[in-house]
Image (cartoon, rainbow, N blue to C red):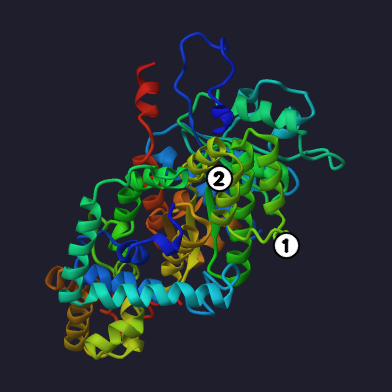
């Protein structure tokens, strides 16, 4: 029922007094090559440099490269060990990086035949991630809208989507948001009939002519008033955050506000404009030298933008780190 | 979340009810750019008809809100609606709507003064990159700055990129940088001081290339 918001606070009775949980920040965006991995590596670095305990997780089991961006050339363990049940303790998979406070769960060495864990294992994985002793867990998602990707994104209602100011990326970002949003709505619905209508609406060319979530809301309200309320709640709770990467002009900066406006006017949910990172040649240099930009050139333009975004993330964080510090 | 048809003019423009004239202008410009037929943000989700319908609402809202007198009259009519007692038996849909409306202001408030959301950097010297960051934050292209300052956008770009050897004599550079700073809302004097210090330290040996390409 209402436990549909995220994976819930863990199983009851798993650890005595409730430990403060890390902030989960999935980073997706649909399209490949928009800089998700770069963003995760550098936001992780920025937060770690601010003194937070950070675990970055490579969720891209089919195209792992977060380890490279963080300068861990040959990870000794990886998420693949968890997927294959070789290791049950995620904490043991979190490797140290060159940056203090920053650890990495890599995704190398996976099974080519079945890279992604099945649904049950994914749920378990997300639950385990919440138990990591950290202030922030940043998850680098693969491209596309595969159910596994969406499950990781759904670990919270405020995941980050990275968009580059190009038509292809913007298009995929909307498909991604659409997929995430409908998935969230369907998970929140209890009644079989209503779920079926939501599933129907997920087909963009559905015969009922349901085009937007606002259309769908009307249908749901007509079917079942209680579900209608739940639907509205789910719409309100869904609050993804948009990061524009590779900005060159002020118009590119504006794109984030435009996307936010369209989310509000067309889809009917609020998106937050988390920030933007400019296009900077230093970015390519950092990837080439396999070190986070924030370590390599903390004063360069893109680093300053990234640090700004990290500040914003930290500012909106619940006081988890304080709780952790007293522990 | 209200469908567009039920939103008031402020909600359509995504500004708070007490938004300043400048805030309304900015919101209008943003909305205008967002809902053109070929807008990067919109073309893949909005049909031309959708975009046209939204544009029409935006234009109407802007017409009313941007004029002080019609805005006053409109505000009065909104207040009158707000003061009207609830209809005796709201439909379930209206109830849902009422719940939504309770929390709408927060969302709307977050939408004002869009470019102010990214706070100004606390410190550090003003170099070319920082000037560019300030400009982007204000949503200005180089051409916008050129229009206001009457300094060619090529020189403005050289200022940002600190291509000192391509800039004219020192006295002009100082003039340009002062105009630039004023245009992007920075304190012209301290910017000019910082910037000229960099300029002087890097253009001592003539012919030296200090350009980052």
- Which residue ends up furthest to the front in the rendered image? B88
Q: Earlier in the sequence, mark 1 or mark 2?
A: 1
Which image quarter is the N terminus of chain A in? top right
Can the viewer see residue B212 in this picture?
no
Callout 1: few (<14), some (14-19), or many (20+) C-alpha neighbours within 10 Å? few
What residue is pinned by disc 2?
A221
Let me know if marks 1 and 2 both belong to one chain. yes
Q: Where does residue A249 sit, x and y in percent of width and height?
A: 43, 74
What residue is pinned by disc 1?
A205
Picture quadrant of residue B46: bottom right
| Residue lying at 20% horizontally and 77% vertically, measured from the top left | B67
Taking the image as shown, residue A123 lies to the left or right of residue B54, namely right
| Residue lying at 19% horizontally and 75% vertically, measured from the top left | B70
Task: Give the numbered dot on residue B205.
Answer: none
Of A280 and B8, nearer the camera is B8
Which element is circle 2 on?
helix
Of B27 and A69, nearer the camera is B27
Callout 2: few (<14), some (14-19), or many (20+) C-alpha neighbours within 10 Å? many
Q: Where does residue A309 sit, x and y in percent of width and height?
A: 40, 51
Picture quadrant of residue A104: top right
Q: Where does residue A119 sit, x and y in percent of width and height?
A: 74, 33
Of A89 and B199, nearer the camera is A89
Task: Examine the rendered structure and indicate whether residue A104 appears above or below residue A166.
Answer: above
Chain for disc number 2: A
Taking the image as shown, residue B175 lies to the left or right of residue A281, namely left
Taking the image as shown, residue B143 lies to the left or right of residue B65, namely right
Q: Where does residue A269 sit, x and y in percent of width and height?
A: 48, 52
Task: Examine the rendered structure and indicate whether residue B195 appears above or below residue A162.
Answer: below
Which element is circle 1 on?
loop
Query: Distance from label 1 to label 2 (Cα)?
Result: 21 Å
Can the viewer see residue B26 in this picture?
yes
Chain for disc number 1: A
């Amino acid at each position: 029922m209402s436990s549909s918001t995220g994976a819930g606070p863990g199983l009851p009775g798993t650890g005595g007094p409730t430990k403060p949980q890390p902030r989960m920040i999935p980073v997706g965006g649909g399209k490949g090559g928009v800089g998700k991995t770069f963003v995760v590596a550098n936001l992780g670095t920025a937060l770690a440099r601010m003194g937070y305990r950070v675990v970055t997780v490579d969720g891209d089991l089919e195209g792992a490269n977060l380890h490279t961006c963080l300068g861990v050339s040959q990870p000794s363990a990886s998420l693949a060990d968890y997927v294959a049940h070789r290791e049950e303790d995620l904490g043991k998979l979190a490797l140290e990086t060159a940056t203090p406070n920053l650890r990495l769960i890599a995704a190398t060495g996976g099974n080519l035949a079945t890279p992604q864990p099945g649904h049950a294992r994914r749920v378990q994985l997300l639950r385990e991630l919440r138990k990591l002793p950290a202030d922030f867990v940043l998850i680098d998602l693969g491209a596309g809208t595969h159910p596994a990707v969406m499950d990781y994104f759904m670990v919270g209602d405020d995941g980050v989507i990275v968009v580059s100011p190009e038509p292809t990326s913007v298009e995929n970002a909307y498909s991604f948001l659409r997929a995430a949003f409908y998935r969230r709505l369907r998970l929140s619905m209890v009644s079989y009939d209503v779920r079926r209508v939501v599933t129907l609406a997920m087909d963009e060319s559905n015969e009922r002519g349901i085009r937007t979530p606002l259309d769908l809301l009307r249908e749901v309200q007509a079917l079942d008033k209680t579900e209608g309320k739940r639907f509205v709640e789910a719409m309100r709770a869904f609050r993804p955050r948009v990061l524009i990467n590779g900005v060159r002009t002020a118009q590119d900066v504006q794109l984030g506000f435009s996307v936010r406006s369209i989310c509000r006017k067309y889809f009917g949910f609020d998106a937050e404009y988390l920030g933007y990172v400019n296009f900077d040649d230093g970015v390519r240099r950092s990837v080439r030298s396999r070190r986070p930009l924030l370590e390599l050139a903390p004063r360069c333009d893109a680093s300053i933008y990234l640090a700004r975004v990290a500040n914003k993330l930290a500012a909106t964080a619940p006081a988890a780190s304080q709780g952790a510090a007293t522990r | 979340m209200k469908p567009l048809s039920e939103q008031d003019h402020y909600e359509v423009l995504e500004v708070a009810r007490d938004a300043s004239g400048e805030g309304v202008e900015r919101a209008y410009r943003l909305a205008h750019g967002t809902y053109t037929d070929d807008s990067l943000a919109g073309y893949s989700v909005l049909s031309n008809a959708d975009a046209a319908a939204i544009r029409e609402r935006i234009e109407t809202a802007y017409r009313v809100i941007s004029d002080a007198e019609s805005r006053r009259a409109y505000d009065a009519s909104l207040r009158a609606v707000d003061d009207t007692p609830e209809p005796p038996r709201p439909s379930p849909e209206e109830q849902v709507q009422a719940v939504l409306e309770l929390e709408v202001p927060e969302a709307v408030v977050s939408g004002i003064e869009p470019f102010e959301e990214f706070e100004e950097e606390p410190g550090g010297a003003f170099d070319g990159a920082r000037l560019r960051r300030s400009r982007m934050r204000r949503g200005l292209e180089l051409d916008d700055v050129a229009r206001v300052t009457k300094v060619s956008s090529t020189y403005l770009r050289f200022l940002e990129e600190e291509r000192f050897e391509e800039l004219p004599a020192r006295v002009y550079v100082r003039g340009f940088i002062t105009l630039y700073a004023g245009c992007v809302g920075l304190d012209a004097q301290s910017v000019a001081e910082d910037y000229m210090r960099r300029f002087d330290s890097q253009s001592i040996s003539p012919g030296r290339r200090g350009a980052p390409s």
